[in-house]
Image: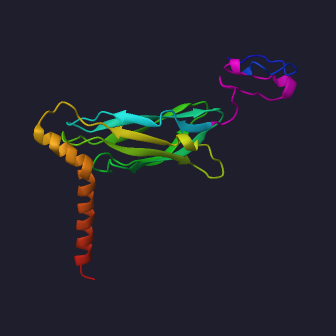
Amino acid sequence: QLHDFDFAKSIEGWSDKSKVALPDDRCKAKVFLQKDGAVGAGQIRFEKTAVSHMPSKNQDTIVKIPVHRFNGSDGKLKCRYRTQADSARKDYDFYAVEGELEFSEHAMERTIEVTITKRKKWEGQDQFFVILSDYSDASPVVVKDSATCTVTIQEINGSSDVVVSIARKLDRVVNMDAFSEGNTLWKEQLMMALQPV
C-alpha cells in the first residue's frame, strides 16, 4: 500500500512506513522506501555466516543456504557464488557448485543448494565454504564481511563401535577423503607420465 506524503513536511518517520510515494503532481516521481528506510537496489549478504548440516549414511542430502538482500529492493540485483573445499572435499563430501544468483525486483531472499554425499559412519566432522562475489567490479553489492558461509557437516551419531571410534579419530588427524583425493591425483599424474609421446 502507498501513502500520500507532503513533500514540504519533515521526512522524519519515513522509515516507519512500509512504502511511501510522493504524489506525481508535486514532483513527477515516485520514491519507494523499505521498512528500514532504504532506497535503491540494495546489497547482498549471507544472513548466517555459519551453517551446520546433519548428513545421512543412506543417501545424499541437500543443505539450503539463504542469501539475503537488504538496504533496498528496486530493480534486479545479481551476484556470483561458488563452493570452496576445506576439510570437506569436493566429490567426496559434497558436490561443488558455482553460478549466478539473481534477485528480481522487490525479491529479498534467494537460496543456494549444495548436495552433501552420504556419509560413512566413521567419518568425522568436516567443513567447506560457500562464497559470494560481485557480478561486476564496477557495481559492488556484496557485503565483504558477510560474503562467506562456513558449512559444517556433522558426524553421524549413534555408533559405539570401537573400530568406528578409532577410524573417526584417524579421519580427524589424516582426513581420509583428502588422502584418497591425493592418491587419485597421483595415479592420474603417473598414468600421464607413462603415456608415449
Which secondary structure dominates the residues rendered in magenta? Answer: loop
Report the number of discs: 0
Which percent across, then down, holds residue 118? 24, 40
Along the viewing direction, whichever of 5 and 149 lies nearer the viewer: 149
Left or right: 2, with 136 as reference point: right
Which percent across, then down, holds residue 165? 16, 40
Give the residue displayed 86% in from the left and 18% down from the top: 9
The answer to whether residue 46 is above or below residue 3 is below
Give the residue displayed 28% in from the left and 54% down from the top: 178
Left or right: 83, with 122 as reference point: right
Which percent across, then down, holds residue 46? 51, 36
Residue 30 can be seen in this image: yes
Left or right: 166, with 153 as reference point: left
Give the residue displayed 78% in from the left and 16% down from the top: 4
Residue 175 can be seen in this image: no
Left or right: 24, with 47 as reference point: right
Asked whether 44 falls inside the magenta stretch, the response is: no
Give the residue displayed 69% in from the left and 29% down from the top: 38
- Check the image and tell me how it is coloured: rainbow
Which image quarter is the N terminus in? top right
Question: What's the magenta region?
Answer: 15-42
Asked whether 32 falls inside the magenta stretch, the response is: yes
Which percent across, then down, holds residue 187? 22, 66
Which image quarter is the C terminus in? bottom left
The answer to whether residue 76 is above or below residue 22 is below
Q: Residue furthest bottom?
A: 197
Q: Quadrant of residue 13?
A: top right
